[in-house]
């Protein structure tokens, strides 16, 4: 992997968060891990690991000294759990959750450029998004309480966020294995504050077979529709639609001024219909299960 910063929080003093999203799929099973580091407005540090299964979420709090992240490579340790570019090692022992095992990653499928584009240079951004791997193979076994999850032919996805807070209003969706394994995508739209003003920003990376499409505000993309269950993005001759169909919402915690005090709902293993039009012609119309869908919209 290329040399760059992988952790930015070592010198932050207050109102800061940094978190990673590790998603793994195998058959009908989905398991996601969100290790995160936070500093609230009073300068108090903390760490958390959220675990999302098909029908349950666990939130495990850790003291700040139980968290470590390397700056020059993808490596995060929280409690006895390790997340890295080669895989993860899980050892959780709480009253509600006993989880142990290892998953090994194949080669990452990385983007040709930062998904934020030139926006990554804008100072004081509320939230910066990064895609670490659109798709990679996953192998191994996790034992969750009394259940064994096998990932011999699993698929993984990794992204991260950092900043002060999640956007006030946003929609996000992600799919790792649509169209028989030919479709991989991530798309998001959010209200972005810049000083006293705000604008509707969007980013999307769509891989369909050998075709790759980047939709983004800095490329001229516009959000035409954004609701709790739907997002429509248009960019020149391209139109992308995502429609949440069957949902399985799980309550998570999200950052607000660095503190993890905001409740949101994510559908980590739901059904989403995706459509892409190019020059008015339908390129694909795919139902993806399991897909991810998350929205916080207040009209």
Image (cartoon, grey):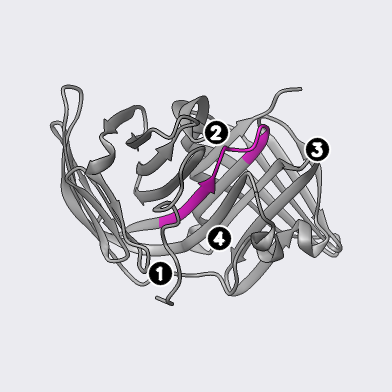
C-alpha separation, residue under disc 3 versus residue under disc 4: 39 Å
Q: Position of residue 296 (x, y in %)?
A: 63, 29
Residue occupied by mark 2: 257
Could you say whether the residue bearing mark 2 is in a helix, strand or loop? Answer: loop
Mark 1 or mark 4, earlier in chain = 1
Residue occupied by mark 4: 183
Mark 3 or mark 2, earlier in chain = 3
Residue occupied by mark 3: 196
Residue occupied by mark 1: 108
Q: What residue is drawn where x is 77% and y is 50%? A: 233
Please tell me which residue lies in front, 157 or 77: 77
Q: Position of residue 136 (x, y in %)?
A: 39, 64
> Label 2 crowding class (10 Å Cα cut-off): few <14, some 14-19, many 20+?
many
Asked if residue 152 shows in the view, the reply is no
C-alpha separation, residue under disc 3 versus residue under disc 2: 17 Å
Could you say whether the residue bearing mark 1 is in a helix, strand or loop? Answer: loop
């Amino acid at each position: 992997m290329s040399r760059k910063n992988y952790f930015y929080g070592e010198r932050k003093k207050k109102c800061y968060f940094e978190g990673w999203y590790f998603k793994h799929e195998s058959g009908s099973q989905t398991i996601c891990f969100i290790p995160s580091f936070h500093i609230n407005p009073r300068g108090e540090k903390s760490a958390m690991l959220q675990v999302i299964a098909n029908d349950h979420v666990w939130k495990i709090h850790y003291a700040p000294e139980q968290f470590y992240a390397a700056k020059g490579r993808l490596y995060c340790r929280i409690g006895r759990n390790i997340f890295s570019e080669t895989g993860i090692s899980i050892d959780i022992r709480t009253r509600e959750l006993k989880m142990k095992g290892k998953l090994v990653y194949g080669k990452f499928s990385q983007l040709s450029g930062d998904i934020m584009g030139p926006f990554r240079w804008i100072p004081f951004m509320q939230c910066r998004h990064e895609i670490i791997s659109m798709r990679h193979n996953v192998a191994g076994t996790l034992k969750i309480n009394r259940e064994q999850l096998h990932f011999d032919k699993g698929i993984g996805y990794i992204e991260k966020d950092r900043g002060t807070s999640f956007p006030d209003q946003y929609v996000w969706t992600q799919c790792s294995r649509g169209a028989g394994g030919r479709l991989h995508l991530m798309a998001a739209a959010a209200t972005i504050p810049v000083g006293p003003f705000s604008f509707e920003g969007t980013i999307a990376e769509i891989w369909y077979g050998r075709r790759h499409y980047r939709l983004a505000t800095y490329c001229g993309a516009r959000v035409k529709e954004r609701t709790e269950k739907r997002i429509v993005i248009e960019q020149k001759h391209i139109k992308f639609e995502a429609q949440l169909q069957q949902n399985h919402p799980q309550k998570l915690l999200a950052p607000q001024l660095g503190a993890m005090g905001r409740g949101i709902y994510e559908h980590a293993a739901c059904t989403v219909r995706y459509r892409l039009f190019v020059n008015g012609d339908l390129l694909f119309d795919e139902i993806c299960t399991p897909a991810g869908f998350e929205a916080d919209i207040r009209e």
